[in-house]
Amino acid sequence: MTYDDIVSVYFAEPAEPIPEPTLPDTLARRLRDVLEPIATHGWWARLPSERVAALGLGFFDGYVWGRAAALGTPAASVVVATFGVFEPSLLTSVYEQAVTVASRDDVLRARAEGAAQSLAAIVSDADAAAVADPLLEALAAVDGMGRPLFSALRELPVPESAAGRLWRAAELVREHRGDGHLAACVAAGFDALTMNVLTELWLGYAAGEYSSTRGFGADRIAVTVAALEQCGWKDEDGLTPKGVMVRLRVEAATDESQAGLVRQLGDRLPGIVETSRRMSAQVLAAKAFPSDPRKRAAG
């Protein structure tokens, strides 16, 4: 799948506006949401995607290898465990093929240079530095225990430019929250597909609409949906109040997993959120992130 294929699917304007999902208004969640279009610049923006494609990788295998490369060149089972939300056999085959096509150093360089150059054309250096520098300072001080993707990414060299530092800081926040979210899912006893379906229904997708993009087939999705209905978490209208509360408990645990980062940022956090909100709006205006607000909320 090429970048233009992705544009035709994910960047097309819907016939009717898609409502913004109703999300908890916590500091940790606000930070995550305003940084998402920046953090994912390494695959959603054209320039880094084309640099990765020049190495012989498609969109999805470039995403998988580019994100996993922070870990080194691990076994596929490690990638499956740390990513958490993809169908394991699909992720294994994509990863094992991708590592034969491009070297770790090349894919890391393509993403970092492409993302920095692309962001530099969209946001100002002053705004980028105003967010990146306090975030990087705080992220360097938080504990990495139980956070493999975050800790691995933190070991990589930080790009020198303001835009490059911004991208790295946003990526680090994303992986910090992602590691915490997986831990919350494990503690709740959920497998990947259960969590995918709970999340997509919570955000306003139809059952399977988002989960299918992560490699899960219709039969397996149907089994999970039936299990949620049996628990009383889903009915014909979507999540029941009981199902919403189950999903909100996982969300609260995910937020709590970022309490250390929120404390490190302290009274700088509201300003970081507002500047990040402005920059993310510029990223969306530049067509470097999908316009669907559910996509921004889902990761």
Image (cartoon, helix red, strand yellow):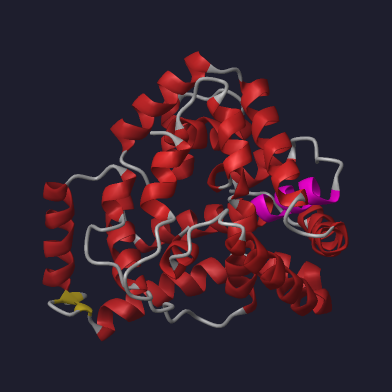
Q: Nearer the viewer, residue 94 or 41?
A: 41
Residue in view at x 17 percent, y 80 percent: 237
Q: Is residue 195 magenta?
A: no
Name above or below for residue 263 compared with residue 289.
below
Residue displayed at 44% across by 40% down = 4
Q: Is residue 296 left or right of residue 108?
A: left
Residue 148 appears in the picture as rendered: no
| Residue 95 x, y percent position in the rendering | 43, 27
As for residue 165 lying within the magenta part, the answer is yes
- Of all residues, the one furthest to the bottom in this rendering is 241
Q: Give the image location of residue 192, x and y in percent.
A: 33, 51
Q: Nearer the viewer, residue 256 or 52?
A: 52
Can you give x and y, in whole percent of width and height, for residue 174 in the image?
60, 55
| Residues in magenta, as a range | 162-171
Quadrant of the image containing the N terminus = top left
Would you place residue 125 above or below residue 112 in this image?
below
Q: Residue 191 appears at what percent x and percent y?
A: 31, 52
Which secondary structure dominates the residues rendered in magenta? helix
Q: Can residue 248 be seen by looking at this rendering?
A: yes
Q: Residue at x 65, y 65 (%)?
A: 280
Write down the quadrant of residue 94 in the picture: top left
Residue 260 is left or right of residue 216, and the answer is right
Report the side of 193 relative to 275 (left or right).
left
Which quadrant holds residue 131? bottom right
Residue ID at (43%, 36%): 60
How many numbered discs, if any? Answer: 0
